[in-house]
Amino acid sequence: MVTKRTTLDETRRALESGATTVEGVTSGFLETIEKGKRLNAFLSVFQRKAIERARDVDRKLAAGKAGRLAGMVIAVKDVICMKGERTTCGSKILENFVSLYDATAVARLQAEDAVIIGKTNMDEFAMGSSTENSAYGPVLNPVDESRVPGGSSGGSCVSVAAGMAHAALGTDTGGSIRQPASFCGIVGLKPTYGRVSRYGLVALASSFDQIGPFAGTVADAAAVLQVIAGHDELDSTSARVPVPDYNAALTKEIRGMHIGLPQEALGTGLDPEVRQAVEQTLDRLRGAGAVVEEITLPHSEYTISTYYILMTAEASSNLARFDGARYGERAPGVRDLAEMYTNSRTAGFGAETKRRIMLGTYVLSAGYYDAYYRKAQKVRRLIQDDFFRAFTKVDCILLPTSPTTAFRFGEKADDPLQMYLSDVYTVSANLAGVPAISVPCGVDGKGLPIGVQFVGKQFDEPTILKVADALGSL
Ligand code: GLN
């Protein structure tokens, strides 16, 4: 199911000419959501509320008092809180959990008059690369419905790819915005760690998680980032770094820009068609006057193991709160405290979540902490240093987003290691805390989208937005 996508700019023009209203735009998206129900992108749709909000925005537009995102319709991953709405995190354990407050990112979007249309399906607690781990069934890739959309933000990605919203919020702990964006042929941006407040985001791995946008175009992703970025006193890890004008960076002028190509990037495990698309992308960038330089990220081979040690450690600790008492459904008929914990968590969590809680508990346990957790922390620093060293020579780094195009349902579901390996190009940006954007760069022989990512210096989203935007018109 591929539907025509609309950009914010197109909508703005239609609103200005009087050809449509925000209510009209919103009901159009609601119809597409209804038609595309089988894709299973949404866990809740705000039929009535979205229309009410849209009417509100129409009134504000008429009065000349509308915010910067007036006319934009946005879907939100169901791991981000919205007051009065369910936040399931794709898990049975939170099936009936209703948020008590808005996440800062959501509050900021609404303050600028975006209409939030619904909450999207996802891998349970954002663990996964295919959205096959949702307790509410998998999400289908609209380009080929026999294939996964990528994960864990599969629902948010598909809502944009299938024309059900202008943009969507996802979260990226190890690639969950960029990898689905590449599988579905859209734009996905993971901001610098600390760029966007995590207040109201249910934590997976707190030192990795970032909220970021999916959109059909780089300009729309930039428009969303503009609003959600910036310090928030409710999140002490959000940075006090000024927010630049992202739209101003979209000049399409990349002459003289230095783009690093890691010598480790095009190695074994990379699908030959993806490799070819990446090489063609490099040629296009050179043609526009960019300078491609070979660089090295010498610790690349350790990224997957380092990521999966540290993220499972953090996840096992963060998920302790889902115990049937503090948060989560309580199993019925329990006789004592231990049984309440055991039965509630056994019934509430899916297989991948349990696997990661066990792995994380193991690497944090007294006898293994030094050998695994502490060692991985040290390697994380080395991986970060690789990037910092590279950025003394180049303005940004180019990497494939994923080693393959979208795979079939079930292809990797029984083999967690194969699934983890599909994150090989994305996790390094999270380990280093740097921003990265995935943009479409071609299709394979089956017509499946291929994505390429640009990784930037900390807080230098303008450079990667600029090159990603320029690539779209080369
Ligand atoms: N696929 C990665 C994982 O399963 C990334 C998840 C994410 O970014 N939320 O851990």
Image (cartoon, rainbow, N blue to C red):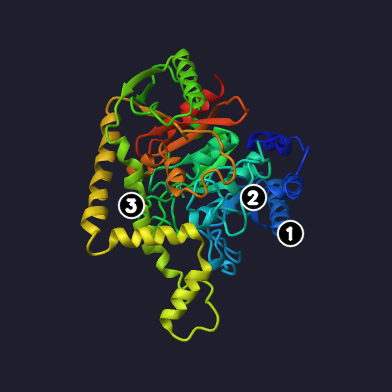
Residue 363, percent from left and from top: 30, 58
Residues tagged 2 and 3 counted as in contact (Cβ below 8 A): no
Q: Amino acid at mark 2?
A: Ala
Q: In this rendering, is residue 172 above or below 445?
A: below
- Amino acid on which disc 1 is placed: Arg
Residue furthest out toward the bottom = 335
| Quarter of the picture holding the C terminus | top right
Q: Is mark 3 within 8 Å of ligand 1?
A: no
Label 3 Cα neighbours within 10 Å, binned few <14 / some 14-19 / many ≥20: many
For marks 3 and 1 on the same chain, the one whose residue lies earlier in the sequence: 1
Q: Residue under label 1, please give it.
A: 48
Can you name the residue that lies furthest to the front here?
Answer: 414
N-term-proximal mark, 2 vs 3: 2
Label ID, residue 142: none
Disc 3 or disc 1, which is closer to the eye?
A: 3
Q: Secondary structure at mark 2?
A: loop
- For the N terminus, the image quarter is top right
**Neighbour tally class for label 2: few under 14, some 14-19, many 20 plus, Cα within 10 Å:** many
Looking at the image, which residue is at 48% across and 24% down? 272
Place residue 408 in its image quadrant. top right
Q: Amino acid at mark 3?
A: Ile
Pointer 3 residue: 309
In this picture, residue 283 sits left or right of residue 118? left
Q: Secondary structure at mark 1?
A: helix
Q: Earlier in the sequence, mark 2 or mark 1?
A: 2
Q: Position of residue 286 (x, y in %)?
A: 44, 15
Q: Which residue is mark 2?
A: 41
Residue 242 place in picture, x, y as percent: 39, 43
CA gap, disc 3 and disc 1: 44 Å
Residue at 49% in and 18% down: 280
Please determine whether, in this image, residue 200 is positioned above or below residue 177: below
- Label 1 near ligand 1 (CB < 8 Å): no
